[in-house]
Amino acid sequence: MLFLEALSRQNRNIADLRLMSSTPDTILRGLLSKSTPPRTTLITSPDAIRRTHALHHFECRFTSKDARRSHRGGEVSLSQLRLELFSLSLFEPASSLLVIRRAHELPLAIAKGISEELMKARGPHTPIIFEGDPLGTTHPIAKIAASLGAAVAYAPLKEIELIEWIRAECKARGISKIANDAAQMLANGGDGCLDTIANLIEVCALSLESDEALTVEACSLIVKVPPAAKEFALVDALAARNRGASEALLSTLLAGGVSPFPLVSLIAKIYGSYLSIQSMRARGIPDGVIQAKLGLQPWAYGKQREVAARMSPPFLRSCYRAILTADSKLKNRSLSPELVMSELISKLAATA
């Protein structure tokens, strides 16, 4: 397909509704079904893409481009906000909106001031939407939205939710079919960051033929996957006890010049995390506390927790001992790195 045709297909799909079954999207659907917007709305997410999509749907539903005013949080004054909120006139469009982008950049004094103005307002004012990174529940903007309006707050995605989001984003950009392994490759390649993954999907959408499926092979050709993503693919294959895939990935990595030392280090880190998860969950420690202690993203923690749950404690301990043994052999250079790593893969991919 020609580049311009692909670009046209992407633009036709860019405004498609990317809403899933999550609580924030359910709230958003409810707001979009009404005839008028709330007087105050807060849209937050740790990534830019989900809140941008939500704001886009909000703006398209309730106003025209000429009837909305937008300011960046760090570049607007309280007097300017007050003027644009309450200076309604006969010449003001009935469907006007005031949008504050990157609301987390609002100075606290201005956030408090505008919240107080909204709280004591008795007459009509221009509907205002605050969009930005997550705010604490005690933040003035979060409190006023909870009290007088609505809040659409997106949380970090767990692994299953991330894959679902990738599929929805692919579909919205004209990619109707995506292989499971390709979705996982995008998740690993973007390190779970939705904004990065969205950029990878955009490259894929511009490069595929109409109705062409996104396969692992196509994904690896279209998007230059960093070596780290292939290393994590090896860890995923080991977690699935897929010896054939593990050996093939190992061969590819070693042939590509990847040193076995960082590979063993990565495997040791992941399996050490499995051990920690098993141990702390056995002691009744909540998942949220474990996730924080290990410093993992929700999707990564959920993935590692599922793998740890599938392994028996004795098998997992034997795996960790095998990793330490392989590390020692590599440092002592008693065997070739290829043989040491092959032995390790055989032990880790064995059935518990």
Image (cartoon, rainbow, N blue to C red):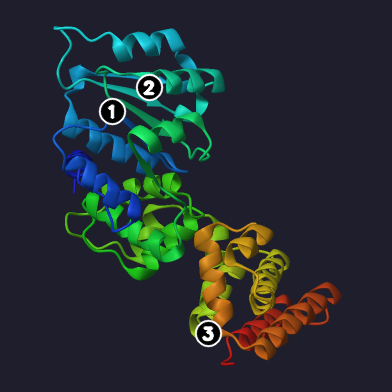
Of residues 90 and 21, the one nearer the viewer is 90
In x, y percent, where is residue 113? 48, 17
- Is residue 74 in sight in this rendering? yes
Location of the C terminus by quadrant is: bottom right
Of residues 217 and 297, the one nearer the viewer is 297
Residue type pointed to by label 1: Arg
Q: Decide: marks 2, 1 in contact (CB < 8 A)?
A: yes
Q: Identify the element where label 3 is drawn.
A: loop
Q: Identify the element where label 2 is drawn.
A: helix
Q: Disc 1 designates what residue?
A: 39
User: Which quarter of the picture shows residue 152?
Assistant: top left
**Is 171 on the left-hand or right-hand side of 293?**
left
Q: How many marks?
A: 3
Q: Decide: marks 3, 1 in contact (CB < 8 A)?
A: no
**Is 178 on the left-hand or right-hand side of 189?**
left
Q: Disc 3 designates what residue?
A: 241
Q: Disc 2 designates what residue?
A: 118
Residue type pointed to by label 3: Arg
